[in-house]
Image (cartoon, rainbow, N blue to C red):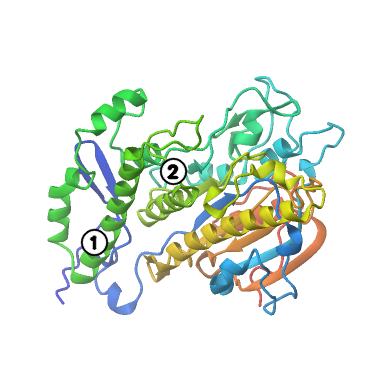
């Protein structure tokens, strides 16, 4: 092996024809001899929030046993193979999702307060008021270190204005991420648009028809950076060339899946036309959105992301698993066992797709470990029992090791009523972001670092 003492900057990009592609961590980004000592560039820690709506069937969620000896329940079974990489956290609550004198509107409050810990103002007008969300507190502090401060994705369309829940604005049910108390960050639901944003291959100010017409004539994003790729590969060692090939293959695979979705002219239902770039099946759709986050983290385009699997009050149907009934009405089952079973199957599907995401992170090399080793991922809902609209004892998972600062593989039961925002305060501390409070937080969570 030839050692040249040259070092490739971490913020190296492949460029060409308006395209900018970030790179994964390479050995060439470490000082000479670093690869032989296993030292080198320290991998950054990513912070991710995945939101599922309408609560969970808690009897099929909450594990038996605590500590490392917990037993995975039916809904958690898809994550059994990843149990050593995650916590199940019980007892956490979102007090500000409750009515507190404002009457109905639990779905809107659940979404708006999940990451803010703030009781949102009951209004269907323009005078919306919530709080700054945990992801945006982190994004603001880390804005200068990545190309994008944060990435907001979603798998279901919704209005951002008007009345969506008992006098509450649609902004509350549509967005879990809030840049300011009056500025929600609506998720991008179109994979093509998210891809174009990450890699800079389109003018997002153009109307959809013009963008679609131009897309018919443009080459693959990788064709646009061929010369830069060839030149860079000529300077890399065999291990780095293999990493580059794996990474660029993943980018191209996502691009091909988006192109396939755009060519699929089937309809979602007889009355809803499918927007360009959105796969027809929910499984494919969710996996594509998860994969976009993986490549964004691998290239260090951002370190903060949110994914809204479906919005609060979601009426999505799941024919892929034999459930043609809308999700939200099913959760108001009034102990109808047939309906409870259907909700449980939906909960299981969401868990399976989350397991897919964790598996992709775990299989993607990143510095001295994997992306999962260097991530902290919160998965859960702002409602516990969807039938009763409870905001206590929320269904919450925490995955990843935070670069060694977390010791997962356990079920931890906290005192009932412990603010969910205490968890966020703890996670932000792990990435060096230390606000005094987040919403209704009263301190950091214990037991995440000890065995």
The image quarter containing residue 337 is bottom right
Judge whether 374 appears above or below 433 on screen: below
- Give percent across and percent down for residue 421: 70, 50
- Give percent across and percent down for residue 380: 64, 54
Cα distance between the residues tagged 1 and 2: 29 Å
- Give percent across and percent down for residue 358: 49, 63
261 and 89: which is toward the camera: 261
- The mark total stands at 2
Judge whether 265 appears above or below 426 on screen: above
Drawn side of residue 64 relative to residue 430, left or right: right
Report the residue that reaches farthest toward the right. 101
Placement of the C terminus among the 4 image quadrants: bottom right
Numbered mark located on residue 245 in the image: 1
Placement of the N terminus among the 4 image quadrants: bottom left
Q: Would you say residue 345 is visible in this rendering?
A: yes
Numbered mark located on residue 280 in the image: 2
- Identified at 62% across, 51% down, the residue is 434
Q: Could you tell me if the residues under marks 1 and 2 are in contact, i.e. CB atoms within 8 Å? A: no
- Identified at 73% across, 54% down, the residue is 338
- Neighbour tally class for label 2: few under 14, some 14-19, many 20 plus, Cα within 10 Å: some
282 and 201: which is toward the camera: 282
Drawn side of residue 365 relative to residue 352, left or right: left
Mark 1 or 2, nearer chain start: 1
Callout 1: SS: helix
- Neighbour tally class for label 1: few under 14, some 14-19, many 20 plus, Cα within 10 Å: few
The image quarter containing residue 243 is bottom left
């Amino acid at each position: 092996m030839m050692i040249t003492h040259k070092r490739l900057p971490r913020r190296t990009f492949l460029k060409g024809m308006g395209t900018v592609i970030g790179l994964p961590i390479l050995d060439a980004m470490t000082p000479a001899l670093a690869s032989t000592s296993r030292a080198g560039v320290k991998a950054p820690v990513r912070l991710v929030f995945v939101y599922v709506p309408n609560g969970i069937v808690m009897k099929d969620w909450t594990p038996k046993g605590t500590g490392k000896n917990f037993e995975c329940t039916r809904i958690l079974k898809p994550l059994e193979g990843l149990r050593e990489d995650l916590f199940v956290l019980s007892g956490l609550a979102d007090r500000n999702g409750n009515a507190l004198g404002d009457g109905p509107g639990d779905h809107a409050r659940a979404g708006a307060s999940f990451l803010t810990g703030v009781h949102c103002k009951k209004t269907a007008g323009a005078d919306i008021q919530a709080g700054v969300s945990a992801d945006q507190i982190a994004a603001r502090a880390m804005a200068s270190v990545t190309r994008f401060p944060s990435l907001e994705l979603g798998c279901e369309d919704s209005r951002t204005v008007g009345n969506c829940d008992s006098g509450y604005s649609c902004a509350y049910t549509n967005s879990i991420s809030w840049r300011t108390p009056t500025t929600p960050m609506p998720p991008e639901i179109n994979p093509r648009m998210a891809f174009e944003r990450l890699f800079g291959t389109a003018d997002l100010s153009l109307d959809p028809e013009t963008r679609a017409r131009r897309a018919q004539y443009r080459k693959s994003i990788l064709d646009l950076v061929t010369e830069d790729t060839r030149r860079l590969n000529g300077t890399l060692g065999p291990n780095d060339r293999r990493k580059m090939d794996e990474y660029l293959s993943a980018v191209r695979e996502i691009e091909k899946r988006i192109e396939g979705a755009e060519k699929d002219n089937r309809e979602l239902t007889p009355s809803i036309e499918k927007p360009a770039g959105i796969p027809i099946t929910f499984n494919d759709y969710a996996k594509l959105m998860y994969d976009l986050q993986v490549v964004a983290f691998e290239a260090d385009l951002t370190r903060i992301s949110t994914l809204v699997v479906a919005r609060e009050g979601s009426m999505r149907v799941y024919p892929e698993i034999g459930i043609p009934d809308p999700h939200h009405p099913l959760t108001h089952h009034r102990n109808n066992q047939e309906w409870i079973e259907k909700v449980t199957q939906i909960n299981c599907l969401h868990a399976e797709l989350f397991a897919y995401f964790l598996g992709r992170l775990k299989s993607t090399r990143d510095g001295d470990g994997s992306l999962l080793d260097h991530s902290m991922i919160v998965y859960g809902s702002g409602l516990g029992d969807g039938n009763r609209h409870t905001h206590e004892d929320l269904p919450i998972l925490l995955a990843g090791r935070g670069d060694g600062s977390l010791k997962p593989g356990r079920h931890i039961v906290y005192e009932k009523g412990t603010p969910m925002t205490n968890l966020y305060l703890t996670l932000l501390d792990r990435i060096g972001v230390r606000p005094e409070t987040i919403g209704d937080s009263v301190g950091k969570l214990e037991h995440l670092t000890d065995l």
